[in-house]
Image (tube, helix red, strand yellow):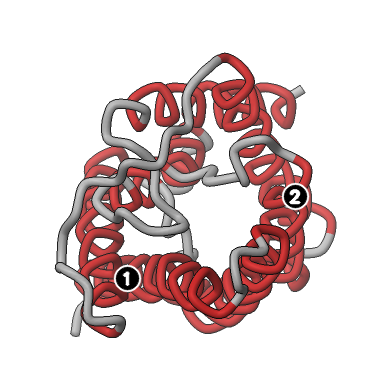
Amino acid sequence: MSNAPRRLTAELLGSLLLTGAVIGSGIAAERMSGGNGAIALLANTGATAAMLFVLITALAPISGAHFNPAVTLVSALKREIGFGMASAYVFAQVLGCVLGAMLAHAMFSLPLISASTHERSGPAQMLSEGVATFALVFAIVATSRARPSAVAASVALVIAAGYWWTASTSFGNPAITIARSMSDTFAGVRPEDAPAFIVSQIVGALIAWMCCAM
């Protein structure tokens, strides 16, 4: 397989497995927590962080392990990737995330697609998503400069922290936001709330890029 198809396959596969872990662990956690939201979120956090660490470690040598249009945008602005390939990355990421949501639903005998009814609206949620994505992109760019081998751990840790210190539980990813709007589960977000999440995520990523460029 030539370079470009390998990179796109890595982005699609990574996005699929990450979303499957986020949504699948949310479903399992909600079912087993007995209504205890804190326990459910803790389980969801651990599964997501663990999967992120593994996927970045395994796939970064192939595609850079973005799995996130906000990360790809910053990479393009830094001229690490061309805008044509960046667009292909975003398509692969969104497709992978949607397939990951469908996979999680199938594993738990749920409809493959179900619009979320989980409300996440208001200024605090939007601020949280901007902050979460800023922290994620800042961690990636700064750690890549200081200690490239620690990027996987940095990303996993910043997302784990974000689940708890942001009001939105730190989506930080436009592609996974789209997928989570198609999942009426613990990890879901209403489709009508998703566009504001995505705008906030892009803004947070751009601010992080500007701060790191200073």
- Identify the residue shown where x is 29% and y is 46%: 116
Q: Of residues 191 and 144, which is closer to you in this image? A: 191
Where residue 53 appears, as percent x and y from the top left, is 63, 75
The disc labelled 2 sits on which kind of residue?
Trp
Image quadrant holding the C terminus, namely top right
- The label nearer to you, 1 versus 2, is 2
Which residue in the protein does label 1 denote?
16
In the figure, residue 92 lies in which quadrant?
bottom left
The disc labelled 1 sits on which kind of residue?
Leu
Q: Of residues 182 and 108, which is closer to you in this image? A: 108
CA distance for labels 1 and 2: 24 Å
Q: Residue lying farthest left?
A: 112
Estimate how packed mark 1 is, as few (under 14), some (14 to 19) or many (20 or more) residues with alpha carbons within 10 Å: many
Residue 164 numbered tag: 2
Estimate how packed mark 2 is, as few (under 14), some (14 to 19) or many (20 or more) residues with alpha carbons within 10 Å: some
- The vertical placement of 98 against 207, above or below, is below
User: Horizontal placement of 138 versus 82: left or right?
Assistant: right
Q: How many marks?
A: 2
Where residue 142 appears, as percent x and y from the top left, is 77, 46
